[in-house]
Amino acid sequence: MAPPAGQIRPAKYLGAFVLIVVALYSLVFFTGNGKATPKLGIDLQGGTRVTLTARAPDGKTPSEESLNQARTLIETRVNGLGVAGPEVIRDGTNLVITVPGSDSEGAKRLGQTAKLNFRKVIGSPVPNAPEPEPTQSAPPSTSGSAAPTESAGKEPTETANSVAPTTAQGRPAPAFEGQPTTTTPPADATTPPADPNAPAGEQPPAESQVDCRAVFQGQYSDDPTRAIEESRTCRQDPQLTTLDAQTVSQALAAFTCPTVDPLIGNDDPALPLLTCDQDRTEKYVLAPVTPPTDGSVKDDDFTLYSRLSGEDVDNAVSGTDPQGAGFVVDLTFKGEGGEKWGKFTSANVSQQVAVVLDTQVVSAPNINEPILGGSTQISGKFSQAEANSLANVLKYGSLPLSFEASEAETVSATLGLASLEAGLIAGGIGLALVFVYCLFYYRLLGVLTILSLALSGVVVYAVLVLLGRWIGFTLDLAGIAGFIVSIGITADSFVVFFERLKDEMREGRSFRSAVPRAWVRSRRTILSADMVSFLAAAILYVLAVGQVKGFAFTLGMSTVLDLVVVFLVTHPLVSMISKSKRLSNPKLSGLGGAVQAAVDDRAPSGAKSTAVKEV
């Protein structure tokens, strides 16, 4: 037989709450890194501040528009990583990124320019060492996805060779044979040719000679513009596409990966490229991305030119390698990009293609078969962090500028900890006043209020830990303020229920019969009040910026958890007390006034007035 309306089986609801708590703390202690502590924001735990120095093409001063666009894109990347609480501000021509904790590398990765190009490998990679030992290993493969293959001591995307390297010759690359140790830059669209008919005074200035031997040893001019010019002259010589395998290997052997590469983000996609991987352990000669504009290459000729850049990428998502070799990045190309990728892979089966990010090779798998349909993978035994970082950079767009991390420092949390201490003191005082009031006014029901608030805190803590792991949520001072405000919302739900219970008992009902009727009438009010609070928090979260979002988030989350505690804990406990003769004693339960009021209503008018006077 079903219980009357408003009556419940308390054990059923309390059991559900216990299961929720057990599930939450099982996730807290048995998943993730095992640390059962929430992530704290910059103002509470300190953090790492990284200053990114902007570098415009050709060393020019970055424009206001490009700096603002870069800041907006970096903020978009930060927001795409979850509610993590970093800060991105402009400081002149620099961008200053502050992240919680000590993850300075994470902040640096946010400034990657992500100028992605797909280049055919025309020179086998060799180790970046003065006297490399000849090695040969099987390169990774690319079919519908890039399947990694083990090689001795190195990751496959970094050691895949098709031609054994030759020992360094101790001289400049043979690409410049017939020239001295200096050479002039190749003519390009940005350098107008000399006009033999023009007066001598109107001739364009001749380009100064570049010492390619020094450039190949990693020595560049101190002037940024000059350093970029030197890099393009020596490392993007058009002759690189016409060399035989032995000469290319000699060029690679003579080249040393620079510690600071001025060519990063400044390479010309219309020229070949001599470069290294991101770890500076392997060296490559790569074909141009785009063919010359003189019509010498047919539009359907993809044997050398991929014609693919980051603008052709539609989406990038990290995931696990189906072959169990770490993580991969799944790339989806746009319609025209997918067609170009299909033509390029069809024309270069058994060849290597390099995925080049900011002039550095990320992966260089073999193409096993034509890849049609516009989808492929970048693999190479990435860690999860590396795969996520690359996917986020590709997904949220390229920056209009190149950045280098010029400064990284630790940010102290002294001010935040002082404010936290003050906030905790204020919250503690507020809780103490609520407890004293509840014990004085509601007695045993006040004890239930304190217990419900404590259990609500238990649930909130577990949720904070899990949100920090899953979406990167960090608790800051504004969030703590939201929790303090939510104490009043939670206590208000108890007051509504208890006062409705008193009203029912003033009408002459017993404690046991009054509980279900009071609950039916009060829960509508509780739901309405919490719904208004939740909507206000949601609207504030959508419209607000910065730390105000943290306040709105915690306020809305606490409001939802308040309903869970009231429905699954407070109401069932009150129902259990009402069925106990000892605990339902009016003097103990704090409902003596309501019982006396009911007695006075039934008494003669003279006695009633006396009773009221005594009360």
Image (spheres, grey):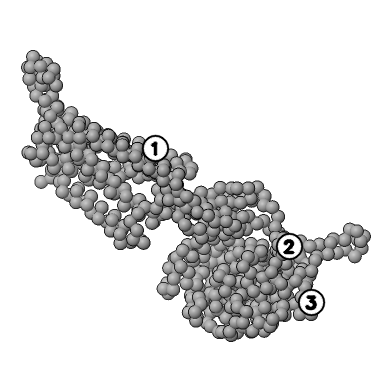
Q: Residues within 10 Å of mark 1 (few under 14, many from 20)?
A: some
Task: Determine which quarter of the picture holds residue 564.
Answer: top left
User: Between marks 2 and 1, how big is the CA–CA gap?
Assistant: 57 Å
- Residue under label 3, please give it: 180
* Residue 536 tag number: 1
Q: Residue beneath label 2, please?
A: 226
Instruction: Tell me the residue at 45%/48% (across/down).
Output: 413
Q: Pointer 1 and pointer 3: residues touching (CB < 8 Å)? A: no
Callout count: 3
Mark 2 or mark 1, whichever is nearer to me: 2
* Rendering coords of residue 77 (x, y %): 51, 54
Indicate which disc residue 561 carries: none
User: In the image shown, does 341 or 38 lie closer to the viewer?
Assistant: 38
The amino acid marked with disc number 3 is Pro
Label 1 SS: helix
Of 47 and 380, nearer the camera is 47
Q: Are marks 2 and 1 in contact (CB under 8 Å)?
A: no
Image coordinates for residue 577, horizontal then vertical, percent: 13, 40
Q: Quadrant of residue 108?
A: bottom right
